[in-house]
Image (spheres, rainbow, N blue to C red):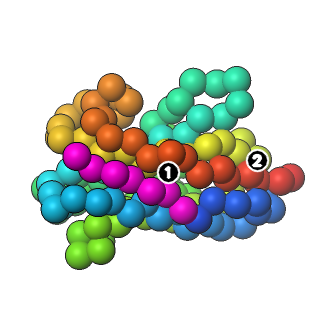
Amino acid sequence: QVQLVESGGGLVQAGGSLRLSCAASGRAFSTYTMGWFRQAPGKEREFVAAIIPWSGGSTYYTDSVKGRFTISRDNAKNTVYLQMNSLKPEDTAVYYCAASTKLTGFRSEHAYNYWGQGTQVTVSS
């Protein structure tokens, strides 16, 4: 069982930055694929980024955040981060951290076994 707790959300002006953190419980954190998803009002939850535990920690992003967001992990701290730069109003959403035992299919929410409660990110224009 893994428990995930996100933090770092808030209100920021367009062009600003935020860093989200997701602290995980459990002893097998380093073996999980970790992902970030987001859900804007009236929209479905969508994939944002993922980091794979093996293969040197390969990272993957949805096209709309490439070059602006960076996902990283600190296995010693059982924490995954999402650094968000050059934020846009369309990035406004509740951001969720998720953990998966799978190494493939990580762009789909159905691949993830565990979810955090979410943290609100609001970008004003």
Name the residue at 25% across, 41% down: 100
Q: Is residue 71 left or right of residue 117?
A: left
> Does residue 92 show up?
yes
Q: Earlier in the sequence, mark 1 or mark 2?
A: 1
Give the number of marks: 2
* Label of residue 12 in the image: none
Q: Which residues are magenta?
A: 1-7
> Does residue 82 show up?
no
Disc 1 is placed on an element classified as loop
Name the residue at 32% across, 41% down: 114
Q: Is residue 11 left or right of residue 6?
A: right
Which residue is denoted by mark 1 in the rendering? 66
Name the residue at 22% across, 59% down: 26
Q: Nearer the viewer, residue 4 or 10?
A: 4
Name the residue at 22% across, 46% down: 1
Looking at the picture, how far across and down is residue 5, in whole percent? Answer: 45, 56
